[in-house]
Each structure stands twice: as C-alpha cells, then as structure tokens.
C-alpha cells in the first residue's frame, strides 16, 4: 500500500451522520496517509443531525475503521469535540480504542513552535449566545449544500470547474466577512494571551493559513465542501492539502475498492 507520511495532520468538520458528508473522500484520504499524530478538530460526527434522522451508510463506517487502523499502525489520535459533537466533551481525558478525547490540545511543531488546537466554537458568539439562530443556520447550510451539488453537476455538464456557492456568498456578504474576521481575531487573541505561537481550528469551514501576524492562524477546513486537511512536514512546514488533488493518483484503485465494498453492502443507506 502506497502511503504518504506526515509528521502531523489536522482534520475537522466531517459531519459524519449527515448527507452532506464526503465520507468516501475522507476514508480514501485516511487510507493513503501515515502520521505520527492525527488531530480530529471537532464536528467529526454530527449528533445534531443524528438526533432527528439516523443516516449512517457504509462509507461513514469506513472512516471509523481506517481511523482505528491508523491507531494500530502507531499514530497518536486526539479527538477534540466541537459544537455538533459536544456530547463527547463529557468524556474528555478518556481513551477509546487508541483515540484520546481532549477539550483542547497543545502541539509542538518540528521547528519548536507551540500551537493551541481547538475546534473554535467557543469563540463563536452565535453558537455560544444564540443557540436557536445557530441551529437555523445549520439547517440553511444543509439546503445550500444540496443546491450547490446540483449547481456543480450542471457546471460539470458544461465543462466548467467546481465552484462553492457558500464560499462565494460568504465573500459577497459583508457581515459574513466580518464574522470570519472576528472569529480569527478572537482565536489569535486567545492564543497570544496564553503565549502560544499559533492556533489550529476548524468550525467555519474555511481552510486558511495566515502567518502574517505575531500568532499564526491555521484553519483545516471541512469535509462537506472543501475536503481539506492541514498537514505538518518533518521540518515543521505547514500546508493545506486538498483531497481531490491528493487522491487523483489513487483514483482508479479507490474506485475499485468502493465497488467491492458496495457489493458487500448492497442495501440502501440507513435512513430512518
């Protein structure tokens, strides 16, 4: 099995249990990597969706299975719950199958920098103070994802590249841009006050690396639209990896593997 080795990997916002989750891409990515430390930076399982409707096809199980395989190969796996999987916060400090649950984590890079690792929802005033608005926003986002996929099918038919409607709208709406800016400022301010060199987070589904300030800001993105991970190389260098590009060389093998799995699980996905 050909695998790419990284010193550390950060993944967030897979939202397993929701129809928007690109679990097949994530399981393929986990299959093709090795690392010393893997951080799940919140919202990996979407308990908000699972409360209203159970949806858990085999691709979602494949993510869990390949995570456990990484742990067996020696990777240290740290799970930091977010707002959609906040029920797991009560288990902080415990270990399940080689997966450590933590409220937050501290990561030391190869070049000696100290990074705070947190999901980021605790720095989001909408989540912390306006719970109903947050739930309505999540529901609206689900519909936008459905529209986005139909829109991009039309674009593929016309021979045009993928385009994210939600990212486009965020850039066009001034209040959304201000929200993202305040979110970043809150996190970097917290990291600076606690004498960290940088902060790694998820939550807002916007992959980004910003080393321009005194405190570096890293957002590992999501696996609903962007399918991105933040990785650290052996020299401490950080990069955002886009799974669609990363997996291109393995596409034929992974398609064959998926067809074999579908033959084992021919029934429709569980959806009650």
Image (cartoon, rainbow, N blue to C red):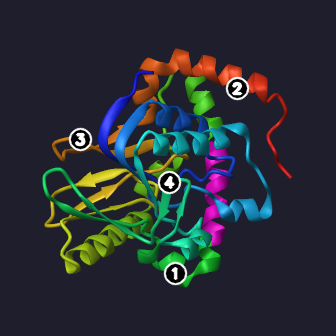
Q: Reading the chain from its start, which is encountered first: label 1 or label 3?
A: 1
Distance CA(mark 3)–CA(mark 4):
23 Å
Q: Earlier in the sequence, mark 2 or mark 1?
A: 1
Magenta stretch contains residue 64: no
Q: Which mark is residue 233?
A: 3
- Outermost residue toward the bottom? 129
Nearest the camera: 249 or 98?
98
Decide: marks 1, 3 in contact (CB < 8 A)?
Answer: no
Q: Is mark 1 on a helix, strand or loop?
A: helix
Residue bearing the label numbered 2? 261
Give the magenta part as a residue range.
135-147
User: Residue 17's spot in the image, x, y percent?
Assistant: 68, 52
Depth check, mark 1 against mark 3: the one in front is 3
Q: How far apart are marks 3 and 2 (CA)?
A: 32 Å
Q: Quadrant of the N terminus?
A: top left
Work out how far the residue at label 4 is from the one at label 2, CA to CA, in angstroms: 25 Å
Compare marks 4 and 2 and give the one earlier in the sequence. Answer: 4
Mark 4 secondary-structure assignment: loop
């Amino acid at each position: 099995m050909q695998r790419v080795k990284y010193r550390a990997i950060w993944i967030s916002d897979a939202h397993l249990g929701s129809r928007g989750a690109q679990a097949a891409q994530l399981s393929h990515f986990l299959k093709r990597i090795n690392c010393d430390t893997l951080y799940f930076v919140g919202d990996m399982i979407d308990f908000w969706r699972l409360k209203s409707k159970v949806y858990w096809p085999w691709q979602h199980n494949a993510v869990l299975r390949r995570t456990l395989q990484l742990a067996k190969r020696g990777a240290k796996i740290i799970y930091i719950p977010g707002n959609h999987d906040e029920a797991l916060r009560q288990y902080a400090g415990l270990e399940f199958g080689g997966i450590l649950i933590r409220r937050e984590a501290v990561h030391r890079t190869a070049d000696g920098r100290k990074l705070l690792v947190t999901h980021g929802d605790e720095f989001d005033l909408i989540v912390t103070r306006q719970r109903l608005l947050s739930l309505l926003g999540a529901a609206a986002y689900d519909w936008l994802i459905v529209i986005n996929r139909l829109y991009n099918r039309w674009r593929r038919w016309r021979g045009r590249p993928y385009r994210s409607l939600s990212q486009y709208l965020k850039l066009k709406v001034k209040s959304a841009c201000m929200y993202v800016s305040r979110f970043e400022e809150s996190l970097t301010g917290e990291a600076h006050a606690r004498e960290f060199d940088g902060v790694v987070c998820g939550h807002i589904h916007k992959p980004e690396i910003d080393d321009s300030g005194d405190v570096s800001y890293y957002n590992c993105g999501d696996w609903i639209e962007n399918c991105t991970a933040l990785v650290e190389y052996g020299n401490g260098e950080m990069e955002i990896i886009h799974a669609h590009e990363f997996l291109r060389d393995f596409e034929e093998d992974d398609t064959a593997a998926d067809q074999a799995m579908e033959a084992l699980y021919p029934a429709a996905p569980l959806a009650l």
